[in-house]
Amino acid sequence: LCISSSTLTHGGDSSTSTSSDGALGVVDLNPPRGTRDFPPEDMRLRTWLFDNFREVSRTMAFEEVDFPVLESEALFIRKAGEEITQQLYNFEDKGGRRVVLRPEITPSLARLVIKQGKSVSLPLKWFTIGQCWRYERMTRGRRREHYQWNMDIFGMPKVRAEAELIQAIVLLFERLGITSSDVGIRLSSRKVLQAVLNMYSIPEHLFAQVCVIVDKLGKLSREEIEKELISTGLSSEAVQGIIEVLSLKSLSKLEEVLGSDVEAVADLKKLFSFAEQYGYADWICFDASVVRGLAYYTGVVFEAFDRKGELRAICGGGRYDKLLSTFGSEDVPACGFGFGDAVIVELLKEKGLLPDLSRQIDDIVFPLDEELEGPASSVASSLRKKGRSVDLAEDKRLKWVFKHAERINASRLILVGKSEWERGMVRVKILSTREEFEVKACDLE
Ligand SMILES: OCc1cccc(Br)n1
Protein backbone atom coordinates (compact mmCIF):
# COMPACT_ATOMS: atom_id res chain seq x y z
CA LEU A 1 0.00 0.00 0.00
CA CYS A 2 1.78 3.14 -1.06
CA ILE A 3 0.60 6.39 0.51
CA SER A 4 2.19 9.43 -1.08
CA SER A 5 2.71 12.07 1.56
CA SER A 6 2.21 15.27 -0.43
CA THR A 7 2.39 17.68 2.49
CA LEU A 8 3.27 16.89 6.08
CA THR A 9 0.44 17.90 8.37
CA HIS A 10 0.91 18.67 12.05
CA GLY A 11 0.41 14.97 12.87
CA GLY A 12 3.24 13.68 10.76
CA ASP A 13 1.89 11.02 8.37
CA SER A 14 -0.44 12.26 5.70
CA SER A 15 -1.97 11.19 2.43
CA THR A 16 -3.66 13.07 -0.37
CA SER A 17 -7.38 12.64 -0.67
CA THR A 18 -10.04 14.38 -2.74
CA SER A 19 -13.12 15.87 -1.13
CA SER A 20 -16.58 15.68 -2.73
CA ASP A 21 -15.84 18.63 -5.06
CA GLY A 22 -12.63 16.93 -6.16
CA ALA A 23 -10.42 19.45 -4.32
CA LEU A 24 -7.14 17.93 -3.13
CA GLY A 25 -7.18 17.73 0.69
CA VAL A 26 -4.69 16.32 3.18
CA VAL A 27 -5.90 13.75 5.69
CA ASP A 28 -3.87 13.39 8.88
CA LEU A 29 -3.32 9.66 9.32
CA ASN A 30 -2.75 9.94 13.06
CA PRO A 31 -5.66 9.39 15.46
CA PRO A 32 -6.83 12.46 17.39
CA ARG A 33 -4.30 13.92 19.84
CA GLY A 34 -3.87 11.84 22.99
CA THR A 35 -5.52 8.74 21.52
CA ARG A 36 -4.15 5.46 20.17
CA ASP A 37 -4.76 3.10 17.27
CA PHE A 38 -4.44 -0.60 18.06
CA PRO A 39 -2.84 -2.29 15.04
CA PRO A 40 -2.81 -6.13 15.24
CA GLU A 41 0.34 -6.51 17.36
CA ASP A 42 -0.82 -3.93 19.92
CA MET A 43 -4.32 -5.37 19.85
CA ARG A 44 -2.97 -8.86 20.66
CA LEU A 45 -1.24 -7.43 23.76
CA ARG A 46 -4.39 -5.55 24.79
CA THR A 47 -6.53 -8.66 24.29
CA TRP A 48 -4.07 -10.73 26.32
CA LEU A 49 -4.21 -8.20 29.19
CA PHE A 50 -8.01 -7.94 29.08
CA ASP A 51 -8.35 -11.74 28.98
CA ASN A 52 -6.38 -11.81 32.25
CA PHE A 53 -8.68 -9.14 33.72
CA ARG A 54 -11.66 -11.26 32.70
CA GLU A 55 -10.19 -14.50 34.04
CA VAL A 56 -9.57 -12.96 37.47
CA SER A 57 -13.09 -11.50 37.46
CA ARG A 58 -14.45 -14.97 36.68
CA THR A 59 -12.55 -16.64 39.53
CA MET A 60 -13.81 -13.90 41.89
CA ALA A 61 -17.39 -14.65 40.75
CA PHE A 62 -17.98 -11.12 39.42
CA GLU A 63 -20.54 -10.45 36.68
CA GLU A 64 -19.60 -8.43 33.61
CA VAL A 65 -21.57 -5.25 32.88
CA ASP A 66 -21.12 -2.43 30.37
CA PHE A 67 -22.16 1.19 29.84
CA PRO A 68 -22.04 3.86 27.15
CA VAL A 69 -18.75 5.76 26.99
CA LEU A 70 -21.03 8.81 26.60
CA GLU A 71 -22.65 9.87 29.88
CA SER A 72 -24.63 12.83 31.22
CA GLU A 73 -22.26 15.51 32.48
CA ALA A 74 -24.38 15.72 35.65
CA LEU A 75 -22.85 12.44 36.88
CA PHE A 76 -19.44 14.08 37.17
CA ILE A 77 -20.15 17.60 38.44
CA ARG A 78 -18.39 17.60 41.84
CA LYS A 79 -17.04 20.61 43.70
CA ALA A 80 -13.96 19.16 45.38
CA GLY A 81 -11.48 20.30 42.74
CA GLU A 82 -10.51 16.84 41.54
CA GLU A 83 -8.25 16.70 38.50
CA ILE A 84 -10.64 14.22 36.90
CA THR A 85 -13.57 16.68 37.00
CA GLN A 86 -11.43 19.61 35.89
CA GLN A 87 -10.46 17.74 32.73
CA LEU A 88 -13.89 16.57 31.60
CA TYR A 89 -14.16 15.73 27.93
CA ASN A 90 -17.53 17.47 27.91
CA PHE A 91 -19.70 19.05 25.21
CA GLU A 92 -23.24 19.88 24.25
CA ASP A 93 -24.88 17.43 21.86
CA LYS A 94 -27.19 18.40 18.99
CA GLY A 95 -30.14 18.08 21.36
CA GLY A 96 -28.61 20.67 23.67
CA ARG A 97 -27.76 18.03 26.30
CA ARG A 98 -24.62 18.42 28.39
CA VAL A 99 -22.70 15.16 27.94
CA VAL A 100 -19.21 13.81 28.55
CA LEU A 101 -16.93 11.07 27.37
CA ARG A 102 -16.75 9.43 30.81
CA PRO A 103 -13.56 10.07 32.82
CA GLU A 104 -14.23 7.08 35.11
CA ILE A 105 -16.76 4.27 35.40
CA THR A 106 -17.83 4.22 39.07
CA PRO A 107 -20.65 6.80 38.60
CA SER A 108 -22.09 4.71 35.75
CA LEU A 109 -22.02 1.62 37.98
CA ALA A 110 -23.79 3.58 40.71
CA ARG A 111 -26.36 4.88 38.20
CA LEU A 112 -27.19 1.36 37.06
CA VAL A 113 -27.42 0.00 40.63
CA ILE A 114 -29.92 2.77 41.44
CA LYS A 115 -31.82 2.13 38.22
CA GLN A 116 -31.98 -1.63 38.89
CA GLY A 117 -33.26 -0.81 42.42
CA LYS A 118 -34.98 -3.73 44.16
CA SER A 119 -34.53 -5.99 41.12
CA VAL A 120 -30.91 -6.72 42.12
CA SER A 121 -30.08 -8.69 45.26
CA LEU A 122 -27.19 -7.45 47.36
CA PRO A 123 -24.32 -7.87 47.66
CA LEU A 124 -23.62 -7.60 43.96
CA LYS A 125 -20.19 -7.86 42.37
CA TRP A 126 -19.79 -6.30 38.93
CA PHE A 127 -16.83 -5.77 36.62
CA THR A 128 -16.29 -4.01 33.34
CA ILE A 129 -13.42 -3.01 31.07
CA GLY A 130 -14.01 0.32 29.39
CA GLN A 131 -12.38 3.31 27.77
CA CYS A 132 -12.18 6.49 29.84
CA TRP A 133 -11.37 9.98 28.69
CA ARG A 134 -9.96 13.28 29.88
CA TYR A 135 -9.45 16.53 28.04
CA GLU A 136 -6.09 17.80 29.11
CA ARG A 137 -4.28 20.63 27.39
CA MET A 138 -1.64 18.75 25.43
CA THR A 139 1.05 20.81 27.16
CA ARG A 140 2.18 17.68 29.00
CA GLY A 141 1.63 15.42 25.96
CA ARG A 142 -0.24 12.92 28.12
CA ARG A 143 -2.83 10.53 26.76
CA ARG A 144 -6.47 11.55 26.70
CA GLU A 145 -7.87 8.04 26.84
CA HIS A 146 -7.11 4.75 28.52
CA TYR A 147 -8.92 1.50 29.21
CA GLN A 148 -9.76 0.64 32.80
CA TRP A 149 -10.72 -2.64 34.41
CA ASN A 150 -13.22 -1.85 37.17
CA MET A 151 -14.27 -4.24 39.91
CA ASP A 152 -16.98 -3.04 42.29
CA ILE A 153 -18.95 -4.59 45.16
CA PHE A 154 -22.26 -3.04 46.26
CA GLY A 155 -24.03 -3.96 49.51
CA MET A 156 -21.07 -5.27 51.50
CA PRO A 157 -20.61 -2.78 54.39
CA LYS A 158 -17.68 -4.49 56.10
CA VAL A 159 -14.03 -4.67 55.03
CA ARG A 160 -14.62 -8.11 53.55
CA ALA A 161 -15.30 -6.18 50.31
CA GLU A 162 -11.89 -4.50 50.41
CA ALA A 163 -10.26 -7.86 51.20
CA GLU A 164 -11.97 -9.42 48.16
CA LEU A 165 -10.92 -6.58 45.85
CA ILE A 166 -7.32 -6.69 47.02
CA GLN A 167 -7.25 -10.42 46.36
CA ALA A 168 -8.44 -9.73 42.79
CA ILE A 169 -5.56 -7.29 42.30
CA VAL A 170 -3.01 -9.75 43.70
CA LEU A 171 -4.39 -12.60 41.57
CA LEU A 172 -4.00 -10.40 38.47
CA PHE A 173 -0.39 -9.53 39.30
CA GLU A 174 0.44 -13.18 39.99
CA ARG A 175 -1.13 -14.24 36.66
CA LEU A 176 1.16 -11.77 34.87
CA GLY A 177 4.28 -12.99 36.69
CA ILE A 178 4.59 -9.96 38.95
CA THR A 179 5.61 -10.70 42.56
CA SER A 180 5.30 -8.88 45.88
CA SER A 181 9.00 -7.96 45.47
CA ASP A 182 8.08 -6.00 42.34
CA VAL A 183 4.85 -4.39 43.56
CA GLY A 184 3.23 -3.44 46.85
CA ILE A 185 -0.28 -2.29 47.76
CA ARG A 186 -0.38 0.71 50.06
CA LEU A 187 -3.57 1.07 52.06
CA SER A 188 -5.16 3.37 54.57
CA SER A 189 -8.60 4.75 55.34
CA ARG A 190 -10.16 8.14 54.83
CA LYS A 191 -11.56 7.66 58.32
CA VAL A 192 -8.01 8.43 59.48
CA LEU A 193 -8.27 11.90 57.98
CA GLN A 194 -11.87 12.17 59.22
CA ALA A 195 -10.64 11.48 62.78
CA VAL A 196 -7.96 14.16 62.48
CA LEU A 197 -10.41 16.72 61.09
CA ASN A 198 -12.73 15.94 64.01
CA MET A 199 -9.84 16.52 66.44
CA TYR A 200 -9.57 20.06 65.02
CA SER A 201 -13.36 20.52 64.66
CA ILE A 202 -13.03 21.05 60.94
CA PRO A 203 -16.48 21.16 59.27
CA GLU A 204 -17.65 18.08 57.35
CA HIS A 205 -18.15 20.01 54.08
CA LEU A 206 -14.36 20.50 53.79
CA PHE A 207 -13.62 16.75 54.01
CA ALA A 208 -13.67 15.89 50.27
CA GLN A 209 -11.71 18.99 49.31
CA VAL A 210 -9.03 18.30 51.96
CA CYS A 211 -8.73 14.71 50.69
CA VAL A 212 -8.18 15.88 47.13
CA ILE A 213 -5.47 18.27 48.32
CA VAL A 214 -3.58 15.80 50.50
CA ASP A 215 -3.72 13.25 47.71
CA LYS A 216 -1.15 15.46 46.01
CA LEU A 217 1.39 14.67 48.76
CA GLY A 218 4.43 13.36 46.91
CA LYS A 219 3.42 15.18 43.74
CA LEU A 220 3.44 18.75 45.14
CA SER A 221 5.88 20.11 47.71
CA ARG A 222 4.89 20.10 51.38
CA GLU A 223 4.75 23.92 51.27
CA GLU A 224 2.34 23.87 48.32
CA ILE A 225 0.12 21.34 50.11
CA GLU A 226 0.14 23.44 53.29
CA LYS A 227 -0.72 26.56 51.26
CA GLU A 228 -3.68 24.83 49.57
CA LEU A 229 -4.93 23.48 52.91
CA ILE A 230 -4.68 26.90 54.56
CA SER A 231 -6.60 28.35 51.60
CA THR A 232 -9.56 26.11 52.46
CA GLY A 233 -9.70 27.84 55.85
CA LEU A 234 -7.82 25.29 57.99
CA SER A 235 -5.71 26.63 60.85
CA SER A 236 -1.94 26.08 60.55
CA GLU A 237 -2.21 23.90 63.68
CA ALA A 238 -4.76 21.65 61.93
CA VAL A 239 -2.59 21.56 58.79
CA GLN A 240 0.43 20.44 60.79
CA GLY A 241 -1.70 17.84 62.61
CA ILE A 242 -2.99 16.45 59.30
CA ILE A 243 0.44 16.21 57.73
CA GLU A 244 1.91 14.63 60.87
CA VAL A 245 -0.73 11.87 61.02
CA LEU A 246 -0.60 11.28 57.26
CA SER A 247 3.14 10.64 57.48
CA LEU A 248 2.55 7.56 59.68
CA LYS A 249 3.52 4.21 58.16
CA SER A 250 2.76 2.04 61.18
CA LEU A 251 -0.72 0.93 62.23
CA SER A 252 0.35 0.62 65.86
CA LYS A 253 1.64 4.22 65.81
CA LEU A 254 -1.69 5.27 64.30
CA GLU A 255 -3.47 3.46 67.13
CA GLU A 256 -1.33 5.35 69.64
CA VAL A 257 -2.27 8.68 68.06
CA LEU A 258 -5.95 8.05 67.36
CA GLY A 259 -6.81 5.44 70.00
CA SER A 260 -7.98 1.87 69.32
CA ASP A 261 -11.70 2.68 69.42
CA VAL A 262 -11.44 4.71 66.19
CA GLU A 263 -13.25 2.94 63.31
CA ALA A 264 -10.32 3.51 60.95
CA VAL A 265 -7.97 1.50 63.19
CA ALA A 266 -10.49 -1.32 63.69
CA ASP A 267 -11.19 -1.54 59.93
CA LEU A 268 -7.51 -1.63 59.03
CA LYS A 269 -6.62 -4.19 61.71
CA LYS A 270 -9.43 -6.42 60.42
CA LEU A 271 -8.20 -6.00 56.85
CA PHE A 272 -4.64 -6.94 57.77
CA SER A 273 -5.96 -10.01 59.54
CA PHE A 274 -7.94 -10.98 56.43
CA ALA A 275 -4.77 -10.50 54.37
CA GLU A 276 -3.06 -13.23 56.41
CA GLN A 277 -5.99 -15.59 55.79
CA TYR A 278 -6.16 -14.85 52.06
CA GLY A 279 -2.39 -15.31 51.84
CA TYR A 280 -1.45 -11.91 50.42
CA ALA A 281 -0.10 -10.21 53.58
CA ASP A 282 3.32 -9.70 51.99
CA TRP A 283 1.73 -7.58 49.25
CA ILE A 284 0.17 -4.92 51.51
CA CYS A 285 1.43 -2.20 53.81
CA PHE A 286 -0.20 0.55 55.85
CA ASP A 287 0.57 4.08 54.66
CA ALA A 288 -1.52 6.91 56.12
CA SER A 289 -0.60 9.20 53.21
CA VAL A 290 -2.79 7.15 50.84
CA VAL A 291 -6.03 9.05 50.34
CA ARG A 292 -6.57 8.71 46.56
CA GLY A 293 -7.79 11.64 44.48
CA LEU A 294 -11.50 11.01 44.09
CA ALA A 295 -13.81 13.04 46.29
CA TYR A 296 -16.33 10.29 47.03
CA TYR A 297 -14.16 7.82 48.94
CA THR A 298 -15.32 7.45 52.55
CA GLY A 299 -13.31 4.57 54.02
CA VAL A 300 -10.46 2.22 53.17
CA VAL A 301 -8.42 3.40 50.15
CA PHE A 302 -5.61 1.51 48.43
CA GLU A 303 -3.24 1.73 45.50
CA ALA A 304 -0.67 -0.59 43.94
CA PHE A 305 2.80 0.80 43.30
CA ASP A 306 6.05 -0.46 41.81
CA ARG A 307 8.57 -0.83 44.64
CA LYS A 308 11.27 0.88 42.54
CA GLY A 309 9.07 4.00 42.66
CA GLU A 310 9.59 4.79 38.97
CA LEU A 311 5.97 4.63 37.82
CA ARG A 312 2.64 6.20 38.63
CA ALA A 313 0.11 4.13 40.62
CA ILE A 314 -0.68 0.89 38.78
CA CYS A 315 -4.27 0.74 40.06
CA GLY A 316 -6.25 2.19 42.94
CA GLY A 317 -9.60 2.20 44.64
CA GLY A 318 -11.52 2.40 47.87
CA ARG A 319 -14.82 2.45 49.71
CA TYR A 320 -17.49 4.96 48.66
CA ASP A 321 -20.50 4.44 50.93
CA LYS A 322 -22.15 7.79 50.19
CA LEU A 323 -21.96 8.14 46.41
CA LEU A 324 -25.50 6.97 45.63
CA SER A 325 -27.13 9.65 47.81
CA THR A 326 -25.35 12.31 45.70
CA PHE A 327 -27.47 10.98 42.82
CA GLY A 328 -30.66 11.33 44.85
CA SER A 329 -30.94 7.70 45.92
CA GLU A 330 -30.65 6.10 49.34
CA ASP A 331 -27.08 5.04 50.02
CA VAL A 332 -25.76 1.54 49.39
CA PRO A 333 -22.31 0.68 50.78
CA ALA A 334 -19.86 0.25 47.91
CA CYS A 335 -16.21 -0.41 47.22
CA GLY A 336 -14.22 -0.75 44.02
CA PHE A 337 -11.06 -0.14 42.06
CA GLY A 338 -9.90 0.97 38.63
CA PHE A 339 -6.93 -0.69 36.92
CA GLY A 340 -5.60 1.14 33.86
CA ASP A 341 -4.08 -0.45 30.75
CA ALA A 342 -0.99 1.77 30.52
CA VAL A 343 1.17 1.68 33.67
CA ILE A 344 0.86 -2.11 33.94
CA VAL A 345 2.30 -2.49 30.42
CA GLU A 346 5.19 -0.15 31.29
CA LEU A 347 5.86 -2.34 34.36
CA LEU A 348 5.71 -5.60 32.36
CA LYS A 349 8.14 -4.16 29.80
CA GLU A 350 10.51 -3.07 32.56
CA LYS A 351 10.35 -6.52 34.18
CA GLY A 352 10.75 -8.37 30.87
CA LEU A 353 7.38 -10.03 31.42
CA LEU A 354 5.67 -9.20 28.13
CA PRO A 355 4.52 -12.52 26.60
CA ASP A 356 5.39 -13.64 23.05
CA LEU A 357 2.17 -12.80 21.22
CA SER A 358 3.28 -13.23 17.62
CA ARG A 359 0.53 -14.12 15.17
CA GLN A 360 -0.18 -17.84 14.87
CA ILE A 361 -2.58 -19.72 12.57
CA ASP A 362 -3.20 -23.44 12.02
CA ASP A 363 -3.32 -23.94 8.23
CA ILE A 364 -2.63 -22.26 4.93
CA VAL A 365 -4.56 -23.82 2.04
CA PHE A 366 -3.05 -23.16 -1.39
CA PRO A 367 -4.44 -24.20 -4.84
CA LEU A 368 -1.49 -25.06 -7.08
CA ASP A 369 -3.31 -23.68 -10.09
CA GLU A 370 -6.37 -21.56 -10.87
CA GLU A 371 -8.75 -24.45 -11.69
CA LEU A 372 -8.27 -25.73 -8.13
CA GLU A 373 -9.48 -22.56 -6.42
CA GLY A 374 -12.89 -24.18 -5.90
CA PRO A 375 -11.57 -27.38 -4.28
CA ALA A 376 -9.21 -25.26 -2.14
CA SER A 377 -12.23 -23.28 -0.91
CA SER A 378 -14.04 -26.44 0.12
CA VAL A 379 -10.92 -27.75 1.91
CA ALA A 380 -10.53 -24.43 3.79
CA SER A 381 -14.24 -24.33 4.61
CA SER A 382 -14.32 -27.82 6.05
CA LEU A 383 -11.23 -27.16 8.19
CA ARG A 384 -12.75 -23.90 9.50
CA LYS A 385 -15.94 -25.72 10.44
CA LYS A 386 -13.75 -28.00 12.54
CA GLY A 387 -12.36 -24.94 14.32
CA ARG A 388 -9.03 -24.60 12.57
CA SER A 389 -7.78 -21.09 11.77
CA VAL A 390 -7.21 -21.21 8.05
CA ASP A 391 -5.70 -18.72 5.60
CA LEU A 392 -6.63 -19.30 1.96
CA ALA A 393 -3.84 -18.14 -0.38
CA GLU A 394 -4.08 -17.84 -4.15
CA ASP A 395 -2.65 -15.93 -7.15
CA LYS A 396 0.74 -16.35 -5.54
CA ARG A 397 3.89 -18.29 -6.32
CA LEU A 398 4.70 -21.22 -4.03
CA LYS A 399 7.85 -19.40 -2.85
CA TRP A 400 5.69 -16.52 -1.56
CA VAL A 401 3.37 -18.99 0.18
CA PHE A 402 6.26 -20.56 2.13
CA LYS A 403 7.46 -17.10 3.23
CA HIS A 404 3.88 -16.15 4.18
CA ALA A 405 3.52 -19.37 6.20
CA GLU A 406 6.68 -18.49 8.12
CA ARG A 407 5.53 -14.90 8.64
CA ILE A 408 2.21 -15.89 10.19
CA ASN A 409 3.57 -18.97 12.01
CA ALA A 410 1.29 -21.47 10.25
CA SER A 411 1.49 -25.03 11.57
CA ARG A 412 0.57 -26.73 8.27
CA LEU A 413 0.57 -25.98 4.55
CA ILE A 414 -2.21 -27.78 2.64
CA LEU A 415 -1.40 -27.92 -1.09
CA VAL A 416 -4.30 -28.68 -3.47
CA GLY A 417 -2.80 -30.09 -6.69
CA LYS A 418 -4.54 -31.42 -9.84
CA SER A 419 -3.24 -35.01 -9.83
CA GLU A 420 -3.79 -35.43 -6.06
CA TRP A 421 -7.25 -33.89 -6.17
CA GLU A 422 -8.30 -36.25 -8.97
CA ARG A 423 -7.54 -39.09 -6.47
CA GLY A 424 -9.44 -37.23 -3.71
CA MET A 425 -6.15 -36.38 -2.00
CA VAL A 426 -4.30 -33.22 -0.84
CA ARG A 427 -0.65 -32.76 0.17
CA VAL A 428 0.09 -31.71 3.75
CA LYS A 429 3.38 -30.14 4.86
CA ILE A 430 4.09 -29.86 8.61
CA LEU A 431 6.13 -26.68 8.70
CA SER A 432 7.94 -27.33 11.99
CA THR A 433 9.31 -30.74 10.91
CA ARG A 434 9.20 -30.30 7.10
CA GLU A 435 7.42 -33.69 7.14
CA GLU A 436 5.22 -34.05 4.02
CA PHE A 437 2.50 -36.58 3.19
CA GLU A 438 -0.70 -37.10 1.23
CA VAL A 439 -4.07 -37.48 2.95
CA LYS A 440 -7.64 -37.97 1.78
CA ALA A 441 -9.25 -34.50 1.61
CA CYS A 442 -12.35 -35.78 3.42
CA ASP A 443 -10.21 -37.08 6.32
CA LEU A 444 -8.37 -33.81 6.86
CA GLU A 445 -8.84 -32.26 10.27
O1 LIG B 1 -6.42 8.28 35.37
C1 LIG B 1 -7.05 9.43 34.99
C2 LIG B 1 -7.52 9.31 33.57
C3 LIG B 1 -8.87 9.41 33.27
C4 LIG B 1 -9.27 9.33 31.95
C5 LIG B 1 -8.32 9.15 30.97
C6 LIG B 1 -6.99 9.04 31.35
BR1 LIG B 1 -5.66 8.80 30.04
N1 LIG B 1 -6.59 9.13 32.62
Image: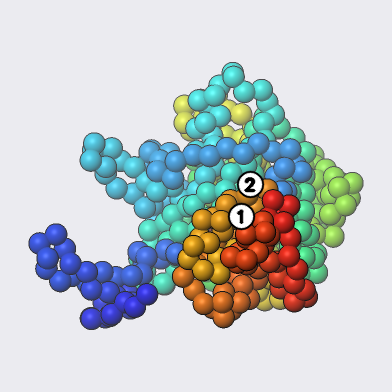
Is ligand 1 within 8 Å of the beta carbon of the residue shown at mark 1? no
Name the residue that disc number 1 marks: 379
Against 56, is 419 above or below? below
Pick whichever, 312 or 65, lies toward us: 65
- Place of residue 326 in the rendered image (x, y in percent of width and height, measured from the top left): 48, 33
Q: Secondary structure at mark 1?
A: helix
Q: Residue furthest top?
A: 118
- Place of residue 161 in the rendered image (x, y in percent of width and height, measured from the top left): 73, 39
Q: Quadrant of residue 429?
A: bottom right
The residue at 56%/56% (across/down) is: 375
Q: Is residue 4 visible?
A: yes
- Callout 2 environment at 10 Å: few (<14), some (14 to 19), or many (20+)? few
Give the distance between the C-alpha atoms of the residues marked 2 and 1, in whole angstroms.
10 Å
- Place of residue 263 in the rendered image (x, y in percent of width and height, measured from the top left): 74, 39
Q: Is residue 363 visible?
A: no
Is ligand 1 within 8 Å of the beta carbon of the residue shown at mark 2? no
Q: Amino acid at mark 2?
A: Lys
Q: Quadrant of residue 5?
A: bottom left
Q: Amino acid at mark 1?
A: Val
Against 392, is 334 above or below? above
User: Which coloring applies here?
Assistant: rainbow
Name the residue that disc number 2 marks: 385
Looking at the image, residue 86 sits to the left or right of residue 185; the answer is left
The residue at 44%/45% (across/down) is: 69
Pick whichever, 372 or 187, lies toward us: 372
